[in-house]
Image (tube, rainbow, N blue to C red):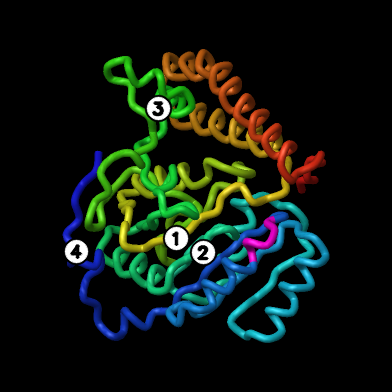
Amino acid sequence: MTKIVTFNVEGTIPATDTVRKRPISVVMVSYMTGPALIEAIMAVLADRDVHELIVVDNGNTESARARLSELTAKRNRVRFLQGHGNIGFARACNYGAKLATGHYLLFLNPDAVITSGAARQLANAGDCLVEPWITGGLLRDETGKEQRGARRRALTPLSALVGFLPILEVIPGLRSIHRETDELPKHTVQIDTISGACLMTDRPSFDKMGGFDERYFLHVEDIEICRRARQLGGQVAFVPGATVMHYGSTSNAPRIWIEKEKLKGFLRYFWHYQPGPMSKILTVLAAPFMAAAILGRAYLLSLRGAMTREGPRKAPPAK
């Protein structure tokens, strides 16, 4: 359930000079991201509130790596980590966070172009929350429309299924996990789940949570860490004033492989967090429908890509 958190009109609170000067580290994990990566990096570097940017290279083309190396050589605020292979998103986030020196940790997708000042808004909002805290910004697409995922309800097998099959919302009591069609709040609100495309916490909170769960290779790790923060007595908040333009789906990784990892993440999450035998039975019953919806969507997206600019792809190696 969404709870109102009291902030000023900017979605932040007045802060002391000491708090305002706490450094922000941005951790960006990239795998075959494409040209959006450079735009995302330049947007981060344009924000003077950002102390450092750590780019974790899980696998990119040689030309992209050369460009990243060039950026690193010219700017001492950028660190480029490579040579470890595709270790998964959650593990790569933890790797970058381990080397980060900032008080605040902003995990930002490599195809997410953050607006100047958004990082500090997320940090200031977090300072009003109970640790371990997490804040997330408003995701918009290239047209300015709010994207799915930035504000979500708690994940259950039924809410996930309704998210994949919206027609089920005609059944009383069934609601999707997604809330982007709800009225956009004017101020920061406490919420169940935000998006890992733009997720901030601070070092004490991150350490208390134990970082991201590395058993989630790709997808659902953001939902899981938000739940863990709440279970530990902390708070999660959506900050509508912190805006990010998110391209989405820019990786050259095969769509089928990506969606399979998403399905695996959902099933792992449900099996771990749904208590009691009946909940596990529900997970088993819902699994085929989720698989059909997820993989069907992947197939359609792959066909659309093949008809436009994309060719056949190979699945990425995992370590």
Position of the N terminus, as image quadrant, is top left
| Crowd class of label 4 (few under 14; some 14 to 19; many from 20; radius 10 Å) | some
Q: Main secondary structure of the magenta part?
A: loop
| Crowd class of label 3 (few under 14; some 14 to 19; many from 20; radius 10 Å) | many
Judge from the rendering whether residue 143 lies leftward or rightward of residue 17; answer left or right. right
Instruction: Using the image, tell me which numbered label, if any, was put on residue 113.
Output: 2
| Crowd class of label 2 (few under 14; some 14 to 19; many from 20; radius 10 Å) | many
Upstream in sequence: badge 3 or badge 2: 2
The percent coordinates of residue 278 (x first, y second) are 42, 14
Which one is in front, 215 or 69? 69
Residue at mark 4 to residue at mark 2: CA–CA distance: 25 Å
Foreground mark, 1 or 3, reads: 1
Residue at mark 1 to residue at mark 3: CA–CA distance: 26 Å
Foreground mark, 4 or 2, reads: 2
Upstream in sequence: badge 4 or badge 2: 4
Residue at mark 1 to residue at mark 2: CA–CA distance: 6 Å
Residue at (59% x, 36% y) in the render = 262
Foreground mark, 3 or 2, reads: 2
Instruction: Using the image, tell me which numbered label, if any, was put on residue 7.
Output: 4
Q: Which residue is mark 1?
A: 244
Residue at mark 3 to residue at mark 4: CA–CA distance: 30 Å
Residue at (77% x, 56% y) in the render = 85
Magenta span = 33-37
Residue 109: image quadrant is bottom right
Q: Secondary structure at mark 2?
A: strand
Upstream in sequence: badge 1 or badge 2: 2
